[in-house]
Image (tube, helix red, strand yellow):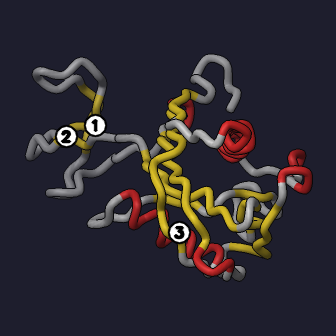
Amino acid sequence: MIVMSFCIVCGHKTEEQIPLGDHKLRRVCGNCGHIHYENPKLICGALAVWDNKVLLCRRAIEPRYGLWTLPAGYMELFETMEEGAARETREEAEAEIDIEHLYCMYNIPRIGQIYVLFKALLKDGVFGAGEESIESRLFEEHEIPWGELAFPSVERTLRHYFEDRKQQHFPVHLETIGTRLDHTG
């Protein structure tokens, strides 16, 4: 958690208080009254598929350096979730995708994040490794490095996909991973 000790509006010291009409402790500027809200971070990404294989990237950055993940990252201002998923896939896997639909959404309250992943088709089967990836690769189900996946959201998305593929029905999956109490996820 980032503590906003000084106001981003006027530069004066902030203090912890419950603003009028609110119910949570917030950082509030004692000078101008600006309330500094802390909100969850949005992560957008894609489960890109080509010829019944899924695209995974091996992370070249922390956290979870060297482990495999789906191309995903923080949403930027002024972009849609779909645009963010396509951008992250381009940046991490040097790949272009055609997004089919929203596929998985994970609430991760323990770390204040929301993951939104889209099912997508990899255009022309072309991909590479961007700056944040050691390598990228297409995997068939039996080749997935299950013990080397970076995040629970990646594992859950892959398991959903391979199970859904059996019925050729890909519903939207909404789940909560971990809580502040159980420290899992």
Residue neighbourhood size for the residue with mark 2, other residues' Cα within 10 Å, grouped as few (<14), some (14–19), many (≥20): many
Mark linked to residue 72: none
Between the residue at mark 3 and the residue at mark 1, the CA separation in whole angstroms equals: 32 Å
Q: Which residue is mark 1?
A: 27
Answer left or right for 147 relative to 163.
Answer: right
Between the residue at mark 1 and the residue at mark 2, the CA separation in whole angstroms equals: 6 Å
Q: Of the residues shown, which amino acid type is indicated by label 1?
A: Arg
Secondary structure beneath disc 1? strand
Where in the figure is residue 16, as x and y percent of width and height?
29, 30
Secondary structure beneath disc 2? strand
Residue 159 position (above or below residue 22): below
State yes or no: discs 1 and 2 in contact (Cβ < 8 Å): yes
Answer left or right for 103 relative to 29.
Answer: right
Q: Which residue is mark 3?
A: 88
Q: Which residue is mark 2?
A: 35
Task: Give me the residue at 79% from left, 71% from top.
Answer: 137
Task: Give me the residue at 72% from left, 73% from top.
Answer: 133
